[in-house]
Image (spheres, grey):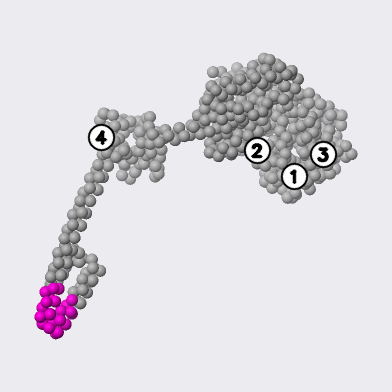
Amino acid sequence: MKKFLTRDRIPAFLQNDNLRYLALGVCFLATVGVILAFFINWLLGIFLLLLFLVLVGIVFYALNQMRHNTNDYISDLTYRIKRGEQEALIKMPIGILLYNEQAEIEWVNPYLQKYFGDQEILQKPLAEVDAELAAVIKNNVDHKTPQTVRWGQNQFEMVVQKSIRVVYLLDITRYAHIEERYQAERLAIGQIFLDNYDEITQTMTDKNISNLSNYVTNELSNWAKRYGMFLKRVDDDHFFLLSYRHTLKRLEDDNFKILDVIRERTSKQNYPLTLSMGIAYNDSDLAKLANLSQSNLDLALGRGGDQVVVKSEQDSARFYGGKTNPMEKRTRVRARMISQALQEVMGQVDQVFVMGHFQADMDSLGACLGIRRIAAMNGKKCYVVVNQDHLHTDIERLLAEIKKYPELEPYIVDAQQAPELATEDSLLVMVDHSKPSITTSADLYEKLANRTIIIDHHRRGEEFPENPMLVYIEPYASSTCELITEMFEYQPKDTESITKIEATAMLAGITVDTQSFSMRTGTRTFDAASYLRSVGADAILVQRILKENVDSYIQKNHLIESVEMLQQNIALCTGEENQIYDSVIAAQAADTLLSLSGIDASFVITQRSEHEIGISARSLGEINVQVIMEQLGGGGHLSNAATQLTDTTIADAKSQLMAAIQAELQPATD
């Protein structure tokens, strides 16, 4: 009996505990009913007993038949699944490759075999069969998620199961081509501006204006037609451009030579016209795209014009052109408007802070003193923020002279002290720079970021304050001191004028940035210098402040002794590893090299601090050192630029510089 009740003897459908208990319960109730029927009537009892036995037999037969049918269905389904798996391995459009521990191919399915052709591949090293595929698998073997890879002319989504040494390859070439076409046909919006159209046409006859306008329109229209773009003139000096992304790539490969064509041909007619463009792409929102293109155009104009800025919201800006000195478009009217706007802003604040870049030079500190005087003339207290830990000898001499003026000295504050003095109603003026990353006090900038004014003469870079209240950037000015000097003419006349030390400091700033009025000077530069002399600037004191000490002179000459010619007209000096050089000494060495015969550009690489390498660059204008320095994260002017590299060596910095020079000058020599 015990053997009969074992699980092997119980029908399969009763092996479920719940179903077995239910069956036993029904049998018990039926047995009780039959017994009661015998007590009532034995014939009724016999009838019910027979009926119960027949029903039990029918149920057992039906359930057994159901079990057999279910087993048959499951067996058939299992067979079909296994057959489907086998067929899938052979026929599905996914390549499967098995390899052993020696990286030898053990098996591939027929779908993947067609990529190898008719060659025998089993039991052969994968690197021998296809080195490219072996390299792709090796580079992605540790990735746990699908990776998009290229093998030959096709693109695949690849998964490598390292534990069982299986590679799955899904060919997505068709979809990749669709995505590439989608990306290539996304819209790019451009704004084209004729930089100096108004200035040139002021003195031209109507006939010449018409000829110039027709020439520019025809040249740009032919250029747009050649590249399959839409061009629409929306103003005398403004065009709207619409193109595809793949067309933009062709324009970038061509380096936007249309700028050179129009500038050179108009120059031959004594009407040198330059263009600036701002182009935006990679956004499905056309309104955002149009706004970004205008912002890119503003960036191009802020850098001096005659160039193209290409940028999306996700990518960093790419610059083309900008190889010529910007033409002077500044007018007295603009200086007056900026001066009046500055007075209005100062009238709304309780106090003013002014600071230059981190390592102050004479133009930076002179401009700070000029803004302090303008603030005082408008009845506002103004503090000059200086980093006392990074001062060159000329700045130290100037600060020593300032101490002789008790009314001025209290307004010179340290970079750590300034944020404590600032309030929510204070104003920050950034002079001689526009990059927050190189400002004297980052904490002060963060506190007053929404109440900031920019006054600078360097070309604007991609890094720029987000919402400045006022921007005055004039890349063709000799110095920031020149720009600020022009503002004094429009200040209140019934207040105390600029003092002798302030005028002397600003004249020293102009002197340093123009290399004693020999570089980047215009008529406005001499006008500013003349005004400063008229209000008491001491030229003798300027020379005394700017004097070199003996150690600096020796260091500079030591640097120059290391000169080597990178090209026939490009000189390079490098300082010694682990020897700290002052940034001013490096700049002076670059200036000295430029004064030598046959040198059109000079570069000086020195170690500025334990973790920083500096590069000073100078040129006579034929070579754009600003573009070269921008490749290394710096900036400046076409003829005067610099950069700083962190966590590198002199030798590595030299390699990076030579690569940047090669990249910039190679197109010109092709």
- Rendered location of residue 248, percent (x, y): 53, 28
Is residue 632 rendered magenta in the image? no
Q: Secondary structure at mark 2?
A: loop
Q: Earlier in the sequence, mark 2 or mark 3?
A: 3
Residue 53: percent from left, percent from top: 13, 72
Can residue 589 be seen here? The reply is no
Where does the magenta region start and end?
30-52
How far is mark 1 from mark 4, CA to CA? 76 Å
Q: Secondary structure at mark 1?
A: strand
Of labels 1 and 3, earlier in sequence is 3
- Indicate the amino acid at tag 4: Gln
Q: Give the CA distance from mark 1 to mark 3.
A: 15 Å
- Disc 1, disc 3: CB below 8 Å? no
Instruction: Specify which label sits upstream in the sequence, 1 or 4.
Output: 4
Give the Cα separation between the discs numbered 3 and 4. Answer: 85 Å
State the mark number for residue 100. none
Q: Residues within 10 Å of mark 2 (few under 14, many from 20)?
A: some
Q: Find residue 156 and report its horizontal and vertical position in percent.
A: 38, 36
Q: Amino acid at mark 2?
A: Phe
What residue is drawn where x is 67% and y is 14%? Answer: 268
